[in-house]
Image (cartoon, rainbow, N blue to C red):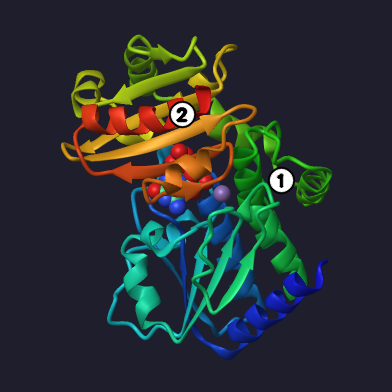
Amino acid sequence: MIDQLKKNMEDALRLINRYDNIFICSHIQPDGDSLGSILALAMAIKKLKEKANVNIIRVDDIPSDFLFLPGIDMIKEQDINEEVDLFIALDSSDTKRLGIGAEFLSKAKSVICIDHHITNENFGDINIVLSSSGSTCEIVYKFIKYMDVEIDKDMASCLYTGINTDTGRFMYSNTTYETHTIVAELIETGIDINSINMNIYQNIPIERVKLFLETLSNLELYADDKVGVVVVSQEMLYKTNASMEDSEGIVSYVRDINTIEVACLLKEMSENEIKVSLRSKRFVDVAKISTKFGGGGHVRAAGCTIYGNLETAKKMVLEEILKDFR
Ligand code: 5GP
Ligand code: MN
């Protein structure tokens, strides 16, 4: 392990040992990696320090796909009037991503930030940030090992889910030899990966399928079909009886079209708030594009929020994307 990383883990562990009132937080619109990492870390800290008061802050709705995760009920709305000693943010590159969690962060005596986004702003007192890591769960795995806590089946199921989803089922370029080594160790604990994969991928509600059809039938192509844009409007949600979290996966589907280099999904959260998801395949840096709009992420998967209507947001993002195709 590189020295700096080891030192940061040592400092983080010291804070965990020092403080009893610990609050753990994912990002808003949580995905498998953020949920898997908060749950596994909370379980590990509880195992390390039985008397610790470990709380996980519920910052948003949890997608139905992940309700099977062990310990999911630990994620609760928390009282801001409680004493907050230590705040631990996971999988979040900046404090805007924490939603209500940011209020707990401001009250905390110390902050630890654990993340793998290249755009991470190092907002913690201690930052365990490794952009070479395919998922935050891989970093949490290393940290739990460092804590010398034995990884049990529940922790392993959570970590496996996060690694699996953030690496696109071990397929994206962020998947390494080390990813597979870690996963092999997780499987060795006896977790049921068949059941986990069925829960994540073979459990699609019919409303989501209808939303996919509606969205993809309106696919727009630009730059010789290298750029694909899809929109999920409130009207489409109403028509298909789906919810916005059902749009998860659409942008990857567009990216997977043979001609596509950049896929863009625009989600109409409300009339003047558009959440943008970007994916690329080979050469476009979508983290850079997202940063121009105050967002961030990874080179091949990033996002931002644009305040304006759908048409305005589409025009603004498309203009930035097309710069890479001139
Ligand atoms: P998604 O498109 O699935 O929402 O996000 C893709 C990646 O970009 C994820 O790693 C996510 O954390 C990051 N991301 C998405 N939206 C934002 C944003 O508004 N700000 C930042 N900093 N990162 C984002
Ligand atoms: Mn992640």
Observer able to see residue 29: no
Q: Amino acid at mark 1?
A: Ile
Give the total number of marks visible in the rendering. 2
Q: Quadrant of residue 199?
A: top right
Q: Is residue 37 found left or right of 223 in the rendered image?
A: right
| Farthest-out residue, left | 271
> Which mark lies nearer to you, 1 or 2?
2
Pointer 1 local density, CA inside 10 Å: few below 14, some 14–19, many at least 20 = some
Res 191 label: 1
Res 323 label: 2
Compared to residue 260, the image places residue 306 above or below, namely: below
Task: Determine the secondary structure under disc 2.
Answer: helix
Q: State the residue in front, 274 or 227.
A: 227
Q: CA distance from mark 1 to mark 2?
A: 46 Å
Marks 1,2: beta carbons within 8 A: no
Q: Is residue 238 found left or right of 17 in the rendered image?
A: left
User: Who's the residue at 32% across and 24% down the image?
Assistant: 231
Pointer 2 local density, CA inside 10 Å: few below 14, some 14–19, many at least 20 = few
How far across and down, in percent of the image, does residue 184 sit?
81, 45
Compared to residue 188, the image places residue 326 above or below, namely: above
Task: Determine the secondary structure under disc 1.
Answer: loop
User: Who's the residue at 32% across and 72% down the image?
Assistant: 103
Compared to residue 245, the image places residue 140 above or below, namely: below
| Farthest-out residue, bottom | 18
User: Who's the residue at 20% across and 19% down the image?
Assistant: 239
Observer able to see residue 290: yes
Of callouts 1 and 2, the N-terminal one: 1
How far across and down, in percent of the image, does residue 89 sit?
49, 66
Q: Amino acid at mark 2?
A: Lys
